[in-house]
Image (cartoon, rainbow, N blue to C red):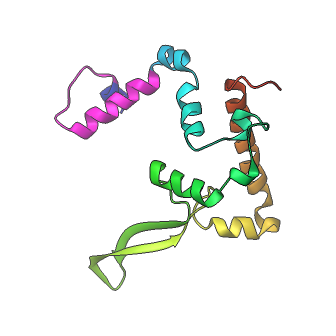
């Protein structure tokens, strides 16, 4: 794949050319260093005030509506926040497809509900996920240039 992405060839497939373009954008270290986290912070702020980026003094709990935020994130980012839907084969007739609806994965993957409800069994995974998220938030916080 790397050879294809880095070749000067223009592909007949629009999808392949789009992937190649995205690859080059992701590999452009000079441009990524130049823009830093600017776009990420703009996107985060487009959802409203976030204390880790904007500071605790700007956040007002009475102005925060988690439901509206999750709906907005779902609309803009295409994330399954409340309900996941997908198309699969009909087990009774494989020539047909079925639209299925399920609970969203809540970040931990399929069957995430069990992760949250069974801490004895999944406590280490939950803690690892929590530490992963804390690490990402610390990086964002650092790039937002907030005082420590």
Residue at 73 percent across and 54 percent down: it is 62
Label total for image: 0
Nearer to me, 21 or 78: 78
Task: Give x and y (percent) for residue 11.
Answer: 20, 31
In which quadrant is the C terminus drawn?
A: top right
Q: Does residue 26 belong to the magenta stretch?
A: yes
In the image: residue 44, left or right of residue 61: left
Question: Can you tell which quarter of the image residue 48 is in?
Answer: top right
Query: Which residues are the magenta region?
Result: 6-27
Q: Residue at x 66, y 41 (%)?
A: 49
Quarter of the image with the N terminus is top left
Going 52% across and 29% down the picture, which residue do you hit? Answer: 39
Q: Is residue 38 left or right of residue 58?
A: left
Residue 57 on the magenta segment = no
Magenta residues: mostly which secondary structure?
Answer: helix
The image shows residue 119, relative to residue 147, as above or below, that is: below
Where residue 46 appears, as percent x and y from the top left, is 55, 39
Residue 10 spot, x, y in % from top left:
20, 26
Q: Nearer the viewer, residue 54 or 85?
A: 54
Query: From where the camera sits, is residue 135 visible?
Result: no
Above or below, comparing residue 147 to residue 135 in the picture: above
Residue occupying image coordinates x 26% and y 32%: 17
Q: Is residue 138 above or below residue 60?
A: above
């Amino acid at each position: 794949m790397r050879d294809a992405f880095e070749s000067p060839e223009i592909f007949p497939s629009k999808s392949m050319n789009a992937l190649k373009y995205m690859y080059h954008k992701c590999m452009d270290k000079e441009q990524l260093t130049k823009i830093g986290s600017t776009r990420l912070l703009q996107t985060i702020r487009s959802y409203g005030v976030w204390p880790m980026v904007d500071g605790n003094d700007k956040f007002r709990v009475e102005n925060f509506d988690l439901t509206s935020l999750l709906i907005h994130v779902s609309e803009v980012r295409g994330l399954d926040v409340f309900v996941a839907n997908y198309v699969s084969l009909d087990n009774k007739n494989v020539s047909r497809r079925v639209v299925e609806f399920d609970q969203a994965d809540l970040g931990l993957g399929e069957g995430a509900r069990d992760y949250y409800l069974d801490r004895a069994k999944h406590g280490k995974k939950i803690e690892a996920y929590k530490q992963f998220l804390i690490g990402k938030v610390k990086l964002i916080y650092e790039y937002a240039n907030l005082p420590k």
